[in-house]
Amino acid sequence: MQDPSKNPGPPDPDAAAIEGIARRVEEIRARNELLIERMFEGEKRFRNLAKAVWKVQEEERRRLARELHDGIGQTLTALVNQLKRAQPAGAVDGGAEDPLHIAEIALKDVRELSRLLRPPVLDDIGLKAGLQWLARIMREQGGLNVVSEWHGEDARLDPELETLIFRVAQEALNNVSKHSGQHEARLTARRLADRVELEIADGGRGFDAAKALSPAVAASGLGLRGIRDRVELFSGQFTIESTAGRGTRLRVVVPLTEGVAR
């Protein structure tokens, strides 16, 4: 009689099907892991590219500011000095049509434009001084009374991080000046051990923040998507709250340990 143990019989179709499914699941898992890895690599390349573009823009601002100050600014300074020397003794101000007056106004405008493009105080002293200068300029030129507060130590940050926070504050305060219907705003910056926080608040008319952040209106909106995208390049967090008739509060938190998004 034949030993039954030596005759396994026909293969179990259910076991074969389960084995096939297991192989297919493993293939899908491996493919998904590869796709996720490629997605992260693509995101990393995109972040690096976006950061490089942003850095080039800031370098171009710095170059233009320097050319305005050292080129056109010095030419206008020389013109103002020559016109002053050419004036007869005891001459009175000729008013808006006076060439000296026109040259002095042009010189002032060029200097202010140079500073707005890239304020030297931001590079020379740091973020705290840059934000204080921005608040003063908004009061003097934009008619917006900005109460500026700085909490924490004054030590310098990474230059790109200082530029980021300054540009966010500049854009946000310009939005307040143009759209809030208010003449007052509060700027609060905090330098903590592991992060930098920036908050811009006003008591103006408010708006629909979700709508302003949507792609459909971003191009003609308040530049909020641009602020959010730049903050995310530094692994930061961007939040904005706005209520009709009760004002707007914009808040940015950027980790110091990240420095720049990699």
Image (spheres, rainbow, N blue to C red):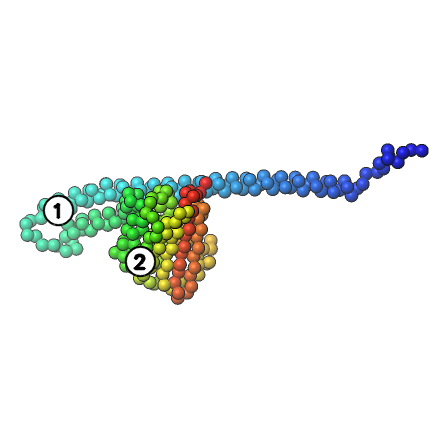
Q: Is there any visible trace of residue 178 in the rendered image?
A: no
In the rendered view, tell whether residue 148 sits above or below residue 121. below
Could you say where residue 118 lies in the image, as x and y percent from the top left?
A: 30, 45
Instruction: List x then y, in percent, for residue 244.
Output: 41, 65
Please tell me whether mark 1 or mark 2 is closer to you in this view.
2
Where is residue 203 shown, x and y percent of the image? 36, 63
User: Residue at coordinates 85% horizontally, 37% vertically from top-left?
Assistant: 9
Position of the C terminus, as image quadrant, is: top left
The spot of residue 256 in percent (x, y) is: 41, 45
Mark 1 vs 2: CB contact within 8 A? no
Sequence-wise, the earlier of marks 1 and 2 is: 1
Amino acid beneath label 1: Leu
Residue farthest along the right direction in this orientation = 1
Left or right of 162, for residue 49: right
- Is residue 248 in sight in this rendering? yes
Q: Residue at x 25, y 43 (%)?
A: 68
Helix, strand or loop at label 1? It is helix
Q: What residue type is labelled 2?
A: Val
Name the image quarter holding residue 143: bottom left
- Residue at 56 percent of width and 42 percent of height: 36
The answer to which image quadrant residue 1 occupies is: top right
Seen as rendered, the residue at the extreme left is 89
Q: Please tell me in which quadrant of the rendered image residue 147 appears.
A: bottom left
Secondary element type, mark 2: strand
Q: Mark 2 points at which residue?
A: 147
Residue on which the image places disc 1? 83
| Residue 204 appears left or right of 139 | right
Q: Nearer the viewer, residue 21 or 109?
A: 21
- Residue placed most toward the observer, 188 or 21: 188
Up the image or down, 78 lies above or below 179; here it is: above
CA–CA distance between discs 1 and 2?
40 Å
